[in-house]
């Protein structure tokens, strides 16, 4: 679509003249042509307030006249009197999370925003909706513990390649175009079909990577962009991992302090960190038995660290985490995996996005260097991020079509970030690249505070920004709510 020169220059001109962040955001919106989409009832299982439409987009945006896929869109219309002030495009994350059911489930959180704005979402290409890739072939992928040498690393790479082969072969052209830059082009097609001159966007979790990819491709078309718990796709992988580990260690320190005084902590009166480290060392020497449902499965230290993440990153699970450590000290690790299911597999369709976005290592040496770095940064959880990225090792450098990169220095309006205590560094790495941006610090634990948790303080700040372009003061925080 060809844009008039005046539309392309409005935001940087406002910034150059010293306009406030609010003026830079709200001033970018203007009258837009009507939507070309046809809306109708969404069907069973979806909130009656939603209307759905379909939009065809190219599989390969560099060859738009060839194969296409159809995206399912959903709209929650503005509820206020008079004409809506515009549309906010929403992505729930994942990557690949289906937007239609996510919006349907979380409509109550959008009530304030809908007083002035339409909310639109979509089921992204190749995602969890199963509309473009078969879930039977693409729902599962590999899960790993840390390879100890080059041979084990190469075996892990082969296992990963086998695990994703069925998904790749089901739709090879689409599988090769799942990166967030391709999805950002889908977003721009949705924006144009909605008749919106500029994009207002709310990205939850990995949905923010789609947003940052859009910001790199189309900076002059961004009106406002709120990024909630967004992964860092603007720094090197090493820097991204460092920030994630530092955040994880902050939460672990909170757990240790809680354990000192809480009657619910099975480790009360002991050094909780030392107890955890002792369990990890014991499991590395001789893997521990698990729950009866696990059969012959045994758990080494890397297994326990990976399983413990879900326990430590939710305060309500801290009593179970402490009890699991205490029980494992006696040789029984069932508390970390009571159902005996082991480490969850990574969906192949998710990997098709994340790996093409560059969350991978270029060979064994790079992988081992990352493991050594994490051991210095995170003595309590080192290796878990590296093992997650290990699944992307079969992707070649040429297949990394959307690697991490900085945001443009000019052209973007101020962004709004939202971050719990353990993700603040990662989110701030993204928003800090755009002049005038603000990141709200949530003084607690909770990933996806607007959509997943419905925090009223966060929702209030985000709504004011997306509606009127009003950013909170730098350093703004939201208090943690009881777990």
Image: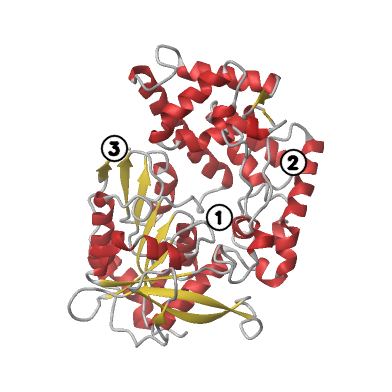
Mark-to-mark CA distance, 1 and 3: 36 Å
Q: Residue 364: give its label.
A: 2
Q: Is residue 181 left or right of residue 478?
A: right
Q: Image quarter for residue 332?
A: top right
Ranked by sequence position, the earlier of labels 2 and 1 is 2
The residue under the point 63% across, 57% down is 139
Q: Image quarter for residue 376?
A: top right
Horizontal and vertical percent position of residue 39: 40, 83
Horizontal and vertical percent position of residue 149: 77, 33
Mark-to-mark CA distance, 2 and 1: 20 Å
Horizontal and vertical percent position of residue 284: 67, 23
Q: Is residue 182 left or right of residue 263?
A: right
Mark-to-mark CA distance, 2 and 3: 44 Å
Work out which residue is located at the far front of the displayed protein and give it.
292
Ranked by sequence position, the earlier of labels 1 and 3 is 1
Q: Is residue 336 left or right of residue 188?
A: right
Display colour scheme: secondary structure
Q: Which quadrant holds the C terminus?
A: top left
Look at the numbered disc 1 and give the secondary structure of its residue: loop
Q: Is residue 235 left or right of residue 430?
A: right
Ranked by sequence position, the earlier of labels 2 and 3 is 2
Dot 3 alpha-carbon crowd within 10 angstroms: few under 14, some 14 to 19, many 20 or more: few
Location of mark 1 (residue): 404
Q: Which of the pair 181/353 is nearer the observer?
A: 353
Location of mark 3 (residue): 482
């Amino acid at each position: 679509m060809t844009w008039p020169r005046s539309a392309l220059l409005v935001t940087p001109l406002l910034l150059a003249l010293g306009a406030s962040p609010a003026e830079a955001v709200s001033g970018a919106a203007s009258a837009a042509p009507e939507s070309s989409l046809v809306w109708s009832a969404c069907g069973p299982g979806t909130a009656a307030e939603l209307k759905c439409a379909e939009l065809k987009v190219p599989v390969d945006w560099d060859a738009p006249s060839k194969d296409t896929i159809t995206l399912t869109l959903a709209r929650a219309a503005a509820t206020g009197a008079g004409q809506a002030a515009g549309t906010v495009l929403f992505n729930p994350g994942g990557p690949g999370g289906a937007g239609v059911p996510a919006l349907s489930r979380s409509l109550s959180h959008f009530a304030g925003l809908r007083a002035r704005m339409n909310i639109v979402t979509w089921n992204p290409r190749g995602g969890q909706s199963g509309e473009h890739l078969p879930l039977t072939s693409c729902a599962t992928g590999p899960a790993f513990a840390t390879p100890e040498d080059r041979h084990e690393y190469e075996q892990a790479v082969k296992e990963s390649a086998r695990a994703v082969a069925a998904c790749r072969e089901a739709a090879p052209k689409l599988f090769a175009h799942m990166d967030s830059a391709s999805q950002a082009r889908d977003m721009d097609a949705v924006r144009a079909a909605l008749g919106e001159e500029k994009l207002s966007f709310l990205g939850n979790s990995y949905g923010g990577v789609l947003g940052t990819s859009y910001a790199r491709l189309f900076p002059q078309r961004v009106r406002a962009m709120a990024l909630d718990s967004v992964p860092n796709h603007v720094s090197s992988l090493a820097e991204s991992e460092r920030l994630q580990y530092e955040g994880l260690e902050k939460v672990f320190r909170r757990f240790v302090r809680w354990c000192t005084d809480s009657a619910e902590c099975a480790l009360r009166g002991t050094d909780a960190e030392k107890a955890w480290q002792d369990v990890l060392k014991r499991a590395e020497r001789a893997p521990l038995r698990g729950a009866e449902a696990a059969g012959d499965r045994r758990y080494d230290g890397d297994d326990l660290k990976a399983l413990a993440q879900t326990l430590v990153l939710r305060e309500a699970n801290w009593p179970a985490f402490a009890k699991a450590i205490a029980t494992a000290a006696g040789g029984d690790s069932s508390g970390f995996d009571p159902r005996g299911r082991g480490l969850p597999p990574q969906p192949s369709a998710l990997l098709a996005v994340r790996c093409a976005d560059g969350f991978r290592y270029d060979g064994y040496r790079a992988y081992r260097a990352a493991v050594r770095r994490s051991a210095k940064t995170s003595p309590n959880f080192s290796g878990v991020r590296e093992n997650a990225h290990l699944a992307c090792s079969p992707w070649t450098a040429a297949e990394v079509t959307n690697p991490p990169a900085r945001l443009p220095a000019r052209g973007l309006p101020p962004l709004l970030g939202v971050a719990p205590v353990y993700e603040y560094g990662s989110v701030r790495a993204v928003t800090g690249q755009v002049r005038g941006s603000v990141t709200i610090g949530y003084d607690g634990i909770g990933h996806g505070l607007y959509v997943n948790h419905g925090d009223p303080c966060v929702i209030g700040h985000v709504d004011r920004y997306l509606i009127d372009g009003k950013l909170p003061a730098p350093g703004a925080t939201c208090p943690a709510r009881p777990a």
